[in-house]
């Protein structure tokens, strides 16, 4: 295990100086918090992560969570984390006061969960899913359901899950068939199977509350006929006892990574005795889920950013300790009698580490920026500000989910490479990070689905208004950077790339105008890569500008080396990563459509 799993100094720089998150305390909803109380909270989360999460990270991988005799067996630390995490507010801190919450900004909560994810990405999901399920109840369920469930879930005594996926309905939720039959008693009888349900069962919660998407008999076909139900594993009775509710745990999926985070197969109503309680209005279930989806997607981006950061720290430590070969001298020769060099002196190793650093830290900035947009969109008293922040969040959210997941995987692969053969061996932790991060581009909407959302919906939403707002933000950063000669060329480069986005969209828009929507979206994932690099370059220029300002002002919050390293990483990003957008634009604007299934036997 590496000595360090995340860089708290960088987290605080991005949170405080780059995102200026303390401005949120000016909003009435967050007025009881201040920077000092948040510091105390972050310190306690770091301490908790050091003591309870990081030490058991490797052992959660093996033996994995598994199914035995009708039960899911998970690492015993799950119990400690549910209990202590609940007590520390790591489930309910963002909830309103009237629901036992602390009205903490999502931005601060995201920073806290980032520390935990970096320490041990198998554990925070147990808290995170309980939080997500409880939030749905708080926002959309009846007072009676709130009274019954919110307190026990918020404290971690009961676990929560999100049950969307079925064997035939993964990306396409319109094909859900789990049924809900109304009864004279006011509840519904639920029947169906849900697969891949994270944190769906274990012995460390006395009950589970599943938020289940199902179709009421006679409901319209497609997404407009899907309703949301609270379905407890055990029914809470008036006397406080719990009665089994015909929810059977049929198995636990064995996986490539995140092996300590159980992934269950649940069967509802096999004995015709599973009660479900409607949340909100009939047929609005998917709408409710989607209203909460932005938070879940920020959570996925955050997890991937954290793993990429932990992998970077581990490979950086190795590169600083491992000697191999000798650095070339200026004559182009190696002095074989000299001591071996540390591998961190080799340019290629430095390139890989810089790629890791740029992706990990840039992703963290993206995730925290999105969380802050969500906080302002939800709680500003100024309606225009709320709408502006909402639109910016909407266009960024598919990128927030996808960039850290996809580029974090590549960054972590570089981390394995930095270790050479040892990177592939179980005694070093890099292989576990590499396996763990692989899932992030699949769950909570695959990269393909996120890319369709970005190009098919978000880019054109409100007649392109969200895109225009984003372009305005990028232009503002370019203007801020141009005050410094060192940063000016990078601002100019970013300006050129912004024009390239317009060119690409004009070209693709031609297909849409001609009614060929399949061609318009056929390379949506390439567009996501292209757009993701542009967004990340903007965020790196923003970070570099803040660092430069601090250097010029002589700020001493961090060392000058710290600030210089941020500027250097921005330059890396522009040279090695932003440059890739040229070839991506070429692919996007190429007329040939080679991937559309039009009857040709391409795979013959
Ligand atoms: C470890 C793990 C944990 C999970 N946790 C949960 C959970 O807690 N709750 C829950 O409800 N679900 C959960 N899931 C399910 C997850 O959200 C789905 O696996 C995911 O949405 C993809 O669905 P699928 O597996 O059916 O793949 P499919 O939908 O069959 O997709 C297969 C491939 O086809 C592509 N594809 C599908 N449709 C289209 C299209 N229209 N256009 C272009 N490409 C397309 C996809 O991008 C993908 O590459 C989890 C899954 C895993 C593996």
Image (spheres, grey):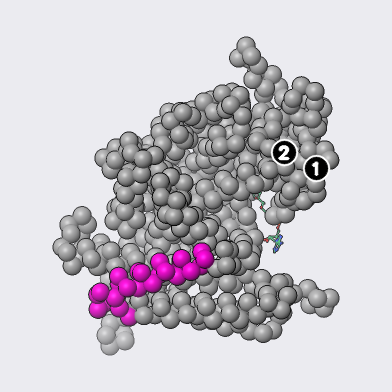
SS type, badge 2? loop
Q: Is residue 338 above or below residue 390?
A: below
Residue at figure coordinates x 37%, y 51% from the top left:
6
Pick the quarter of the image with the C terminus: bottom right
Percent position (x, y) of residue 224? 74, 48
The residue range painted magenta reads 465-489
Residue at figure coordinates x 58%, y 72% from the top left:
527
Residue at figure coordinates x 52%, y 78% from the top left:
502
Q: Residues within 10 Å of mark 2 (few under 14, many from 20)?
A: some
Q: Quadrant of residue 204?
A: top right
Left or right? Give the position of 21 relative to 548.
right
Left or right? Give the position of 528 relative to 344.
right
Q: Are marks 1 and 2 in contact (CB under 8 Å)?
A: yes
Magenta span main SS: helix
Instruction: Read off the residue under disc 1.
Output: 219
Instruction: Read off the residue under disc 2.
Output: 282
Q: Can residue 365 be seen from the camera position used here?
A: yes
SS type, badge 1? loop
Percent position (x, y) of residue 84? 44, 29
The reply to whether the magenta stretch includes residue 488 is: yes
Percent position (x, y) of residue 1? 41, 49
């Amino acid at each position: 295990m590496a000595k360090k799993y995340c860089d708290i100094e960088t987290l605080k720089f991005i949170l405080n100086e780059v995102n200026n998150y303390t401005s949120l305390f000016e909003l009435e909803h967050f007025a009881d918090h201040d920077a000092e109380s948040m510091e105390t909270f972050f310190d306690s989360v770091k301490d908790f992560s050091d003591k309870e999460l990081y030490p058991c990270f490797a052992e959660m991988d093996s033996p994995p969570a598994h199914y035995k005799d009708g039960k899911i067996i998970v690492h015993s630390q799950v119990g400690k984390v549910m209990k202590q995490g609940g007590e520390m507010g790591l489930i309910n801190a963002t909830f309103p006061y009237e629901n036992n919450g602390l009205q903490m900004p999502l931005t601060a909560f995201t920073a806290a969960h980032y520390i935990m994810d970096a320490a041990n990405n198998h554990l925070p999901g147990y808290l995170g899913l309980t939080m997500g399920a409880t939030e749905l109840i708080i926002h959309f369920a009846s007072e009676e359901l709130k009274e019954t469930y919110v307190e026990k879930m918020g404290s971690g005594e009961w676990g929560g899950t999100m049950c969307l996926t079925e064997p035939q309905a993964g990306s396409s939720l319109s094909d859900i068939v789990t049924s809900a039959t109304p009864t004279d008693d006011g509840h519904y009888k639920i029947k169906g199977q849900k697969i891949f349900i994270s944190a769906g069962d274990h012995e460390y919660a006395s009950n589970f509350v599943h938020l289940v998407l199902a179709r009421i008999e006679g409901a319209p076909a497609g997404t407009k006929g899907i309703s949301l139900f609270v379905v407890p594993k055990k029914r809470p009775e008036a006397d406080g006892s719990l009665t089994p509710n015909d929810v059977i745990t049929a198995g636990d999926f064995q996986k490539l990574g995140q092996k300590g985070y159980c992934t269950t197969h649940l069967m509802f109503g096999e004995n015709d005795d599973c009660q479900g309680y409607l949340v909100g209005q009939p047929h609005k279930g998917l709408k409710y889920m989607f209203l909460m989806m932005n938070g879940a997607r920020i959570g996925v981006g955050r997890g991937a950013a954290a793993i990429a950061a932990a992998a970077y720290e581990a490979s950086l430590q190795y590169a600083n300790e491992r000697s191999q070969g000798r650095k070339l001298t200026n004559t182009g020769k190696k002095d074989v009698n000299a001591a071996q060099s540390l591998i961190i002196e080799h340019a290629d190793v430095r390139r890989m580490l810089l790629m890791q650093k740029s992706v990990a830290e840039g992703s963290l900035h993206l995730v925290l920026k999105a969380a802050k947009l969500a906080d302002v969109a939800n709680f500003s008293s100024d309606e225009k500000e709320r709408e502006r922040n909402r639109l910016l969040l909407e266009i960024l959210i598919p990128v927030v989910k996808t960039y850290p997941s996809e580029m974090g995987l590549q960054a972590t692969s570089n981390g394995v490479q930095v270790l050479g053969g040892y990177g592939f061996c179980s005694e070093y932790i890099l292989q576990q990070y590499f396996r763990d991060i692989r899932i992030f581009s699949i769950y909570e909407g695959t990269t393909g689905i996120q890319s369709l959302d970005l190009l098919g919906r978000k880019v054109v939403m409100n007649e392109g208004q969200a895109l225009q707002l984003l372009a305005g933000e990028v232009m503002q950063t370019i203007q801020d950077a141009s005050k410094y000669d060192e940063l000016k060329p990078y601002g100019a480069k970013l300006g050129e790339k912004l024009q390239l986005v317009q060119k690409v969209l004009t070209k693709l828009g031609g297909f849409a105008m001609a009614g060929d929507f399949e061609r318009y979206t056929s390379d949506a994932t390439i567009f996501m890569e292209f757009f993701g690099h542009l967004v990340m370059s903007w965020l790196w220029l923003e970070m570099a500008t803040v660092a430069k300002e601090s250097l010029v002002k002589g700020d001493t919050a961090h060392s000058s080396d710290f600030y210089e390293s941020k500027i250097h990483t921005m330059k890396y990003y522009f040279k090695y990563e932003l440059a890739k957008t040229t070839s991506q634009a070429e692919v996007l604007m190429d007329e040939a459509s080679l991937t559309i299934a039009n009857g040709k036997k391409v795979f013959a």
